Structure formats: structure tokens, C-alpha cells
Image (tube, rainbow, N blue to C red):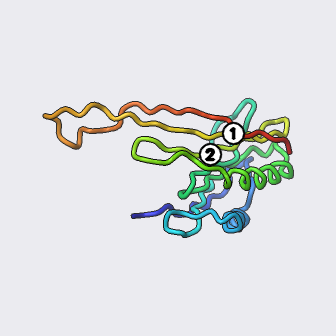
Amino acid sequence: MTFNKDLKSKPKKNRFFPLRFGDAVRAVKDLNLKQYDDSRLAIRMENIEGEFKNRFPLFDLVPEEELAIFSLSEDLSTKPIQKAFMLALSKASKLKVKPKDHIHNSYFSVYFNLDNQVVIIRVDRTCKLKRYRGDDKLKNARYGDTSCKEVMLESFRV
């Protein structure tokens, strides 16, 4: 079984990461976030494109797999975002997800609003298998539709 590896990226022009890579590693170790094999959770620093109207994604936490940290526009002030990031990470690390199988999985998304509000959302994904007929080969059995349901778990001001 292969496990995720770290992805350390540099922010694009006019963007920044809310946390440095070394600080993210320290936070993951302090919060005891681990992968399936008891190694440290993988950290992925990702540059995202596009502008968001009223909320900016801070990170996605996939329990026992990875922490994806997203870059933000330099128009935002860094101090409240760093504080919001650490508070949200500590709160999200204590939350539990639904059990995972080959059809269902869940992860946490954290957003930062312009009014200094942090929103923690659980995203539940369900993949529906296509019908497998007796004369089809096994390679034709693929996933069909995928549906996502977002459940707001917590919201707080920084």
C-alpha cells in the first residue's frame, strides 16, 4: 500500500500560503495527525486558481491521508488568517468522519470569510457504481455518478 507524500509548492505571483511548510509540519505533529501506517499526515501546499466571492478556502483535511493547504490572494491580511488557520486545524482534527468504504468517503473543508469568520464543513462524497451486466468484462465496471453533500459543522469569528 502506498501512502501520500508531501508536496511543497511555492506560492504563485500575488498569492501566499497562510502557513509555512515547516510550521504546518510542526502543527500536524503537535495535533498527532497520522496516516494509516502511523506516519505523519502528508501535507500538500496547493496553488488554486479563480476568485471566490464571499469565502476563501484555507485547507482540506482528509483524515488519515493528507492536509491540503491552499494559497490565498495577497489582498487579504495575514495575521487573522494565520490565527484562523491554527484554530480551525485544531478544531477539525478533533472531529470524526463517517466510516470510509469504496463508495463513501468524507473530508473536512475550512473556509475564511471576509468578515473574519471561519466555517468548517464536512463534505460527504458518494460514488454510484454503474450496473454490471453478466456479459460485460470486469474492466467495464466503473463508477457512475458522484454526488457531494456539504454539512456545516462549526462557524466562529477570529
Write the residue at 39% across / 46% down: 102
Q: Secondary structure at mark 2?
A: strand
x and y percentages locating residue 112 in the rendered image: 76, 41
What kind of residue is marked 1?
Answer: Leu
Q: Residue at x 13, y 34 (%)?
A: 135
Observer-nearest of 31 and 139: 31
12 lies left or right of 135: right
Q: Residues within 10 Å of mark 2 (few under 14, many from 20)?
A: many
Q: Position of residue 69 (x, y in %)?
A: 65, 52
Disc 2 target residue:
108
Quick one: 149 or 13, which is closer to the camera? 149
Residues marked 2 and 1 touching at CB (< 8 Å): yes
Q: Compared with residue 2, is residue 50 higher up or lower down, i.e. above or below?
A: above
Which of the two discs, 2 and 1, sits closer to the camera?
A: 1
Question: Residue 153: which disc?
Answer: 1
Rendered-image quadrant of the C terminus: top right
20 in relation to 17, above or below: below
